[in-house]
């Protein structure tokens, strides 16, 4: 009788240990999948950003070698059933974040190089022509998208549209080299009476901006 009770107790202890192991295993899976789910949207946005940039500007953006990321993904796939640890997801996230930061910097540099001259031109025009809601809208759009990350294909199309609209604005005003030089000086509060050349006066009159010009002493 006593032996039966001892045997039953031992069996119960074994069963409790098995249940405890299974519970811990389940918790590991839950933590793993929760961590993976949290990061999945980041992974997808990153991949979509790269694909959009490469497709839209293939002359500047070249698809990167992401073998290190693929290696981390393969390691995660091979081990998650027997070892579903969050650390594997963390390794993958860190590797992707390195590429993410690099490509964010690439986009910002590219966008700035494409937009800074037209933004400078538009700001110069505003100094002479006065504030213009449409010009302000274009400038804000270009500046905002230059800093945006992740970037989508629709964002890139909008960025191109802003650039086209900005260049059309500047082209329609027929700014020459001398006029642009004058506008840059005005924008930086460095223009003097000597900078108001006959060509500048003619441009101001043609665009009805002459009444916006104010001469004052320092």
Image (spheres, rainbow, N blue to C red):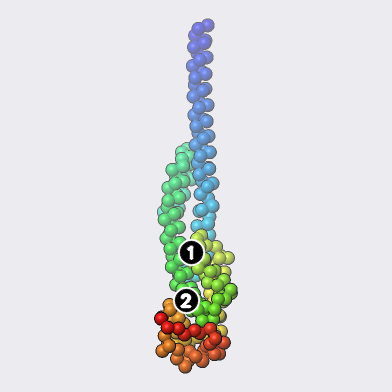
| Rendered view: 23 above or below 46 | above
Q: Residue at x 53, y 69 (%)?
A: 140
- The residue indicated by pointer 2 is 120
SS under mark 2: helix
- At a point 55% along the width and 80% down the height, the residue shown is 169
Q: Secondary structure at mark 1?
A: loop
Give the image location of residue 23, x and y in percent: 52, 30
Q: Position of residue 203 (x, y in %)?
A: 52, 89
Q: CA distance from mark 1 to mark 2?
A: 17 Å
Q: Is residue 59 above or below residue 88?
A: below
Report the disc number at residue 147: 1
Marks 1 and 2 close (CB-CB < 8 Å) = no
Q: Is residue 217 above or below residue 70?
A: below
Q: Position of residue 205 (x, y in %)?
A: 54, 90
Nearer to me, 166 or 128: 128
**Residue 15, above or below 96:** above
**Crowd band around label 1 with a 10 angstrom C-alpha radius: few (<14), some (14–19), many (20+):** some
Ranked by sequence position, the earlier of labels 1 and 2 is 2
């Amino acid at each position: 009788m006593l032996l039966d009770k001892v045997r039953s107790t031992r069996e119960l202890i074994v069963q409790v240990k098995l249940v405890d192991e299974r519970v811990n295993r389940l918790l590991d899976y839950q933590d793993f999948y929760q961590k993976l789910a949290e990061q999945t949207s980041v992974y997808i946005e990153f991949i979509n950003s790269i694909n959009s940039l490469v497709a839209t500007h293939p002359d500047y953006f070249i698809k990167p070698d992401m073998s290190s990321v693929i290696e981390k993904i393969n390691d995660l796939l091979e081990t998650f059933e027997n070892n579903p640890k969050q650390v594997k997801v963390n390794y993958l996230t860190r590797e992707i974040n390195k590429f993410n930061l690099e490509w964010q910097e690439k986009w910002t540099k590219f966008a700035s190089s494409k937009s800074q001259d037209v933004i400078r031109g538009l700001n110069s025009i505003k100094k002479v022509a006065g504030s213009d809601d449409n010009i302000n809208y274009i400038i804000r759009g270009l500046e905002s998208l230059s800093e945006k990350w992740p970037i989508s294909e629709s964002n890139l199309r909008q960025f191109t549209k802003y650039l086209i609209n900005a260049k059309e604005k500047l082209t329609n005003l027929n700014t020459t080299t001398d006029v642009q030089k004058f506008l840059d000086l005005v924008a930086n509060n460095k223009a003097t009476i000597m900078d108001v050349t006959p060509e500048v006066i003619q441009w101001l009159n043609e665009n009805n901006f002459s009444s916006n010009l104010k001469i004052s002493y320092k």
